[in-house]
Amino acid sequence: MNKKDNQLTANQDYQRTLVAKIFNMQPRVSLESETAERMQVEIKTETNSKVNDQTDAQAITQTNTSNNIQTDTQTGLNIYTNNFIENGIRALSITFPTVEGLIGEDSFRVLSRQFLRYEAKASFDWAEYGITLPTFIESQEALETYPFLSEVAELDWSIHCVQREADKKFQPATFAALESGDTNALRFIAAPGLQIRNFWFPVVDLYRLIHDPYLQSEEGMVARKALLKNSTELINNAINMTTPRSLILWRAEYKAQFEYVPDAEADVIHKINAQSSVDAVIDTIGSHNIDLVEWLTKAISNKLIFAVA
């Protein structure tokens, strides 16, 4: 604007002010001032709107980010939980293969899921998990039709533990000391994992039904049916038994072995595990009228005992 125009505008403002005072009115600003004011208001409003929009956008972003973090966290937890459960089921199926074979894969998965919620995993190694499964099975009403299943689980666990025993070196030459040494100062070195378990049900027969390759073949069908019939009879008669049967387990070389033994031989194993002297073991053998030479020959041949020390 030039100087003349500025004077004109000032005069117009003065006249409007004068008229406003006469009629007690608020003066209007000039068009230029009004436009400037309006622009300031619009700018301020737009700025506030942008700030509000930006704040809202930030709030929405933060909410979405929070929701995404929660979703990602939940997804991660779900993946971890599913992996944990699947690893647990797989580990239990390796440790308790006979139990799985008897009740089927689907039922075993259900049982494993329930057990994983019941028993916390206390060790990093899955191979150390499952010791209380036999007791857990006993408490399951759904498995009452399988009264033998908890003992089968106990056998599976025992075999599993024997397999994990530390190696020992079989030393047949040391048995010569029995002829020339002081038997009261000597003792038998037991095979890795040598132990005794008592069972009411025919767990060995049930184990064979699941794991014996011949019984799974067409050629072994007749033998399988006969063993199944005999096992069923033994299961039904278990309630009338006065004492359980003794089963010894041990590891010869790299494979677990197990077999039923009379109570007399079980007493001998107890003496060996107690690290009693050879004299004490021989006395126990004699008290049960067991043939010493026959027993010792079999024990060495089957690697039930690994050395004399």
Image (cartoon, helix red, strand yellow):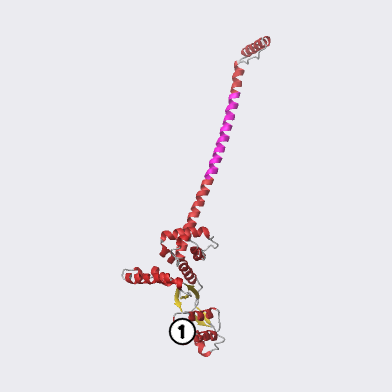
Q: In the image shown, does 133 or 86 lie closer to the viewer?
A: 133
Write the residue at 59% across / 16% down. Answer: 31
Picture quadrant where residue 302 is located: bottom left
Which residue is disc 1 drawn over?
295
Q: In the image shown, does 78 or 260 lie closer to the viewer?
A: 260
Q: Secondary structure at mark 1?
A: helix
- By secondary structure, the bulk of the magenta-drawn segment is best described as helix
Quadrant location of the C terminus in the rendered image? bottom right
Picture quadrant where residue 28 is located: top right
Q: Position of residue 190 (x, y in %)?
A: 51, 79
Magenta segment: does it hold 47? yes
Whether residue 201 is visible, yes or no, is no
Q: Position of residue 275 (x, y in %)?
A: 55, 80
Q: Which residues are magenta?
A: 40-68
Residue 5, above or below 68: above
Report the amino acid beneath label 1: Trp
Magenta segment: does it hold 16? no
Q: Position of residue 36 (x, y in %)?
A: 60, 21
Quadrant location of the N terminus in the rendered image? top right
Residue 147, above or below 297: above
Q: Position of residue 168 (x, y in %)?
A: 50, 76
